[in-house]
Amino acid sequence: MSWQTVVGLEIHAQMATRSKMFCSCRRETGLDPNHNICPVCTGWPGALPVINEAAVRCAIRAAICLDCTIQRESRFDRKNYFYPDLPKGYQISQFYRPYALGGAISFEREDATADRLPLVRIHMEEDAGKSIHASDGTSRIDLNRCSSPLLEIVTEPLGMSGIEAASCVRSLRHLLRWVGVSDGDMEKGNLRCDVNVSVRPDASAELGTRTELKNLNSFVSIQRSVEVESKRQIEVLEKGGTIRQETRLWDQDLEVTEEMRSKEDSPDYRYFPEPDLPVIVIEQQDIDRERQSLPELPAERYRELVDDLGLDPKEALPILARRENCEFFAALLEAGLSATSASNWFRGEVLRHLNDRSERIDQYPLAAEAIAVVVKAVEEDRISVGKGREILQQALDEQRDPNEILSESGEQISDESALVGWITTVLSENPEAVNKIKSGDSKPMGFLMGQVMKASSGQAHPRLAQDLLQKMIEQD
Ligand code: ADP
Ligand code: MG
Ligand code: ZN
């Protein structure tokens, strides 16, 4: 029998606003514990919340780019529960009247086809604080995170694999970062995901009973927990057992899921409308204004790069990874590079450098114009590709203008007598390599070319030098 795995996601994304959801404390991490709090976010008696307008705007932007239907009127509700990191005794959330319904996340299937995961809703809410459990058995509470603004994005259940579930979250994160709604750092906990998993005998049957896996904090955990949990469910069902609706925990070291609580002992939150906050009214003009402030979305940029500029989709994706990358790439085009060479140098030099250091484009010290000057020198055959790369590296190492290094380094030398001079020296110094090549082993060619480039301090015209080297060995 073949089984289908069905997944539904509940994703929490912290919005990248300056202040918190209902008070004027900064939304900031990395501060000393309990140093970023006030009577409102720590729930002192009598303190009154105020809705952060910037957070509502941010939420509207998210809903627009996820194609949701934004509700003209929505409302906050109290979700009551007791936990040490929630001093108010309730979380302000939207339960009965969320601000956005419907919509979808576009994502890629394992076979590279495009698909959409429909959304049920998005609502705004506030985050709780953090409990820190130390190894000495004590627990501490840091309330800095209390009342940080969150979006909860709830999807419909859809047949998909673990890899595809991770791909949905990756795609959502990409979009939220692109429009500046969230930093989306899973390691920092400002993007968290609950995964609901069920299995059914085939795609047309009724949905199976689901289990819920809480607080997955990496793409690998999302993928693996879906794979492991669906396998567990299939094994239970094939042995004639039944699945109980329950919340399970993912142990990423052991790669197993274990029971946390069943549906029967799931808490009753006694939701009721938040009496201290007004109804939120979002007019069409508010939506239009946010829409106008949105940058061009990744799908449009993708079409430009692939359809208009003729890049391969594989080349386009790393450029599209961040909006700032696209802007840098556009500046390379603006500086006169062709799409192909802008793409080659951007990926080969700029992104490689950044990836090596886990840095982002805004930390890259060279300007697009400066890179373009070097690339043009390569394209006009004034310097070799290798020399061009070297100049960029030197510019990074010495924090200098590549243009300056370029003018110091002199142009590429194609003068035959100079080339012959360097090659003659290299051949006489490496008789063994020469003999190998003559006996049919072409491997040492690369080494000899390297020696020639070194002898010329990188100035020999590589193609001419290569041809000449070949000829001189044959004639030797
Ligand atoms: P709750 O609020 O108790 O978590 P919801 O009905 O709001 O319950 O559903 C939460 C999530 O569970 C949604 O993302 C939904 O897509 C998912 N879900 C519901 N039924 C299934 C199922 N049979 N298989 C997989 N996921 C499911
Ligand atoms: Mg849930
Ligand atoms: Zn506060």
Image: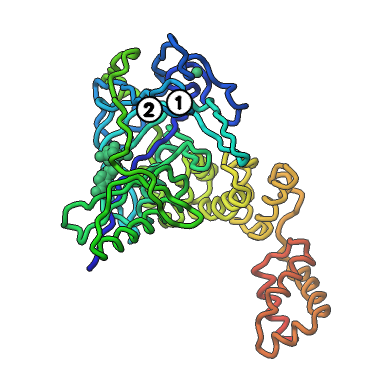
In the image, 68 versus 148, the foreground residue is 148
Q: Is residue 112 visible?
A: no
Q: Quadrant of the C terminus?
A: bottom right
Q: How many marks?
A: 2
Looking at the image, in which quadrant does ligand 1 appear?
Answer: top left
The residue under the point 56% across, 21% down is 36
19 to the left or right of 58: right
Pinpoint residue 72: horizontal percent, then vertical percent: 24, 21
Q: Which residue is mark 2?
A: 81
Q: Quadrant of residue 54?
A: top left
Locate residue 153, reporting x and y percent.
Answer: 34, 36
Q: Quadrant of the N terminus?
A: bottom left
Q: Are marks 2 and 1 in contact (CB under 8 Å)?
A: yes
Q: Is residue 364 visible?
A: yes
Residue lying furthest bottom in this view? Answer: 439
Report, in whole angstroms, how far the alpha carbon at label 2 lies from the one at label 1. 8 Å
Give the residue displayed 78% in from the left and 84% down from the top: 432
Of the numbered discs 2 and 1, the one sitting upstream in the chain is: 2
Q: Amino acid at mark 2?
A: Tyr
The residue under label 1 is 86
| Disc on res. 268 | none
Q: Secondary structure at mark 2?
A: loop
Near mark 2 (Cα within 10 A), the count class, few <14, some 14-19 or many ≥20, is: some
Under tag 1, what secondary structure?
loop
Q: Nearer the viewer, residue 446 or 297?
A: 297
